[in-house]
Image (spheres, coloured by chain):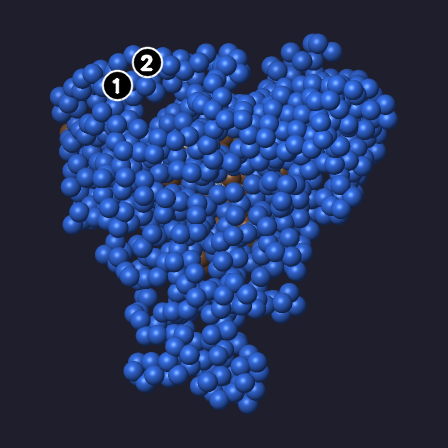
Amino acid sequence: MSQTVSMTVNGRAVSVTVDQPQMPLLYALRNDIGVTGPHFGCGLGQCGACTVHVEGEAVRSCQMPVGEAAGKRITTLEGLGTPEHPHPVQAAFIAEQAVQCGYCTNGMIMQSAAFLTKTPRPTEVQVREELANNICRCGTHPRVVAAVLRAARG
Amino acid sequence: MNAIIDRRSLLRAGGAMLVAFNLGLRPRDAAAWAEKPVATDEVGAFLSIDAEGGATVFVGKVDLGTGVRTGFMQIAAEELDLPLGRIRVVEGDTALTPDQGATYGSLSIQNGGVQLRAAAATARRELLRQAAERLGADAARLRIEEGVVIAPDGRRATFAELVGGRAFTLKVDANAPIKPPEARRIVGQAVPRVDIPDKVFGRFHYVHDFRLLGMLHGRPVRPPTLGATVEAVDEASIRGIPGVVRVVHQGAFLGVVAETEWAAIRAARELKVRWSNWAGLPEQAKLWEHVRATPVAQVQVTSDRGNAAQAIQGAAKRLSASYDFAIHTHGSMGPSCAVAEFKDGRLTSWSASQATHNLRKQLAMMLGLPVEQVRCIYMEGAGCYGRNGHEDAAADAALLARAVGRPVRVQWMRADEHGWDPKGPPHLVDLRAGLDAEGNVVGWESEAFIPKGAGGNVDLTAAELGGLPRENQLNPGNIIHNLAVPYAFPAVKTVCHRLETTPFRPSWIRTPGRMQNSFANEAFLDELAAEAGADPLEFRLRTLPRDDPRGREVLERVARLAKWQTRPSPQRVREGEILRGRGVTFVKYELVRTYLAGVAEVEVNRRTGAIRVTRFFCTHDCGQIINPGGVRSQIEGNIIHTLSRTLKEELTFDRGAVTSLDWGSYQVITFPEVPEIAIELIDRPTERPWGAGEPAAAIVPSAVSNAVFDATGVRLRSVPFTPAKLRAALQGV
Ligand code: FES
Ligand code: FES
């Protein structure tokens, strides 16, 4: 039975009507709310492409039923920063040119941004460990690590 | 400006630029099936100047996430003296862009960019000629600044005034003078990529993000085994899912269409189908026996000098070995995706195809449409590293859209991608060689066992499953390259046994054949160096032809970069659990272009068999460099991707289908496993630009094999170098 779920996405109150509350949040974001920063990569929680912040925590939106997002504060890549006011991690990704196809980039940035709020001065090893479950097939890894460390330096 | 007067003046000026039409086309506008020139000998096929004096570049080569779009912009900006910000790029639209062939082989700059450069240089010469006419000045004394032609006395004519909004109608002159190196301002610079800000702020539009009004969502329902056929479809099984529009069924092609993506996903999962049994795949454990037993369609000799067999026979020392390389999947981060729309009997297809002009023909063939009725438009997808599933998703979408009469978007699930994208075929090479008493190679023979075919079209899965028209040919890429060697051995024979079949529909994956052949050659050469008691880098230098200074240079430079210590392999000290080693390798890509040398440093855990590549060094000569930042980034990416393939990746399968259907069963490199990478670029601004990117992948597997040998004395000849394989090999020492 269809059901309406309300949440805050990038500071905006939104409601979506879904047939099944078990539908992953990712599809609501991409198709109903119109934010395409988070990507579908595996739908299995294995790659990180779909990562968003839920109440400030990095969450894989392909694994979170939209029903569980009710009342929650969601931030996506679009809401993290803008060209005028970039998040330090976004600015660092540009400075390090840490993107190739960019399909993984959403996950890399969202995971790192949440990580840096808890671990503001990580070591290189900590960054690598934090991103160990984020896949990149284009081989941007060294630049991603450099970007996260650059963002941490401020 | 009055078009008629302008036309007359143009005709007086030599009739080179005629009034045509405004090229303010939106690339994604399906309505615009414009009559724009697309022939590769027309300047107008590549370039137009809009009414504001900005340029649009039209290229058949596409940016697969490699940054080549920025490179094209640099090339055009340089020759036209326009700022980068006033150039936009239209890629891979069959109605608008020239057919420059598929985007593969690291040929985008080498071929596509050089074509564009010639078109831009021709346009520049023409603009100068027109300006000279208008300003009554000598063309040779004019200069161009930011799209304005300026005479010595300061009078000016803008590009907009000269040609704005009208098409170039002149032929590309391949000899039109290009900017000399000292005058270049943009080419050769590490210009930041134009696509990165949008990608970082979530504003980039991938094909996955493309939506049309009234669009439905489709999902293919693939058979559980590669050869199964449909016996019965129980459409009632998904009746309870709201929003399901249609089950489309054509032979073994099955798909569902629904109003929402989630409904399509559920329907594809829950649809009950009875499939026939099929078990036509070989046993994975006996893959290499299967390859050896496969009938040979053709024997191709790729090099033959002297009498290699006899030379080896008479040699003081003889060596032989077999090298094999596992089946790989492209494993793009984003499963393949496409959107199709039929309108007035014409199909428009949006996809991330690396070859839209070829896809157009394939879709027309499958659907029984004249080619003119099909338009394929490129939109960037996830990086593809070769012919992955994008074209197949486009075919799925086309069949589904035709069936329901509304636009349909198809995105595969992860298991569709891992299970059904075409695969890099199994590759097997036997080698034999002989050394004389001084340790010189006197004869070299190799035989590769690889599927037939080249770089043509890979059949569309939907056509295959649906029993629809297709070319029915194998095309694994030009996998014979680099079996012949760049060394001056007195006697060499290299032979490819081109096999009739291969277990999975093959296609090219990054560095097809060149990677596998270079692995075999460069690791086997290392075996010979060890047998000769020679330092492996010295051994290569002394075996390279004297008249190949660029080859020597990359090797000499990598020795300095990696602080190479001259000594034979393996190293003598083998104490403790962790053994360390280094390996060198050399590749001249396809024996005619980009030169590379690499050094890998490894740590091997002899208890677990785990290999950790700690550092990787690469020296790289691709002639003229358009964007050193882009080249570095591509080299890094290729090294890391290939380390992943070398150390970890292997398709698994049972007798019916692929079983490595996710990232758990098909493991790839992770952040903690990525080595430090040091790259030295050799720029040659006066040379032609060669490919950069996939050549760097060719040096990886052999460098690692050689380093592991240096550390342990054990030779790894089978990719991937899993801990289990290394443990087994170490037990034999
Ligand atoms: S798409 Fe969610 S983790 Fe891969
Ligand atoms: S940049 Fe392409 S997958 Fe990471």
- Looking at the image, residue B144 lies above or below residue B480: below
Q: Which residue sits at x=51%, y=56%?
A: B113
Q: Residue B315: which quarter of the image?
A: top right
Q: Return the residue nearer the eye: B239 or A13.
A: B239
Q: Chain of mark 1?
A: B
The brown one among the chains is A
Q: Return the residue nearer the eye: A154 or B142.
A: B142
* Three-letter residue code for mark 2: Trp
| Residue identified by numbered label 1 | B229
The blue one among the chains is B
Q: Quadrant of the C terminus of chain B?
A: top right
Pointer 2 residue Cβ closer than 8 Å to ligand 1? no
User: Residue A31: x, y in percent?
Assistant: 27, 42
Q: Quadrant of the N terminus of chain B?
A: bottom left
User: Residue B685: x, y in percent?
Assistant: 65, 59
Q: Return the residue nearer the eye: B475 or B301.
A: B301
Q: Earlier in the sequence, mark 2 or mark 1?
A: 1
Mark 2: secondary structure: loop
Q: CA distance from mark 2 to mark 1?
A: 9 Å
Residue B159 visible in the snapshot: yes
Q: Which residue sits at x=41%, y=20%?
A: B658
Q: Return the residue nearer the eye: B653 or A145.
A: B653
Residue furthest top as drawn: B732
Q: How many neighbours does mark 1 have within 10 angstroms: few (below 14), some (14-19), or many (20 or more)?
A: some
Disc number placed over residue A116 in the picture, else none: none
Residue B600 visible in the snapshot: no
* Three-letter residue code for mark 1: Thr
| Residue identified by numbered label 2 | B278
Q: Chain of mark 2?
A: B
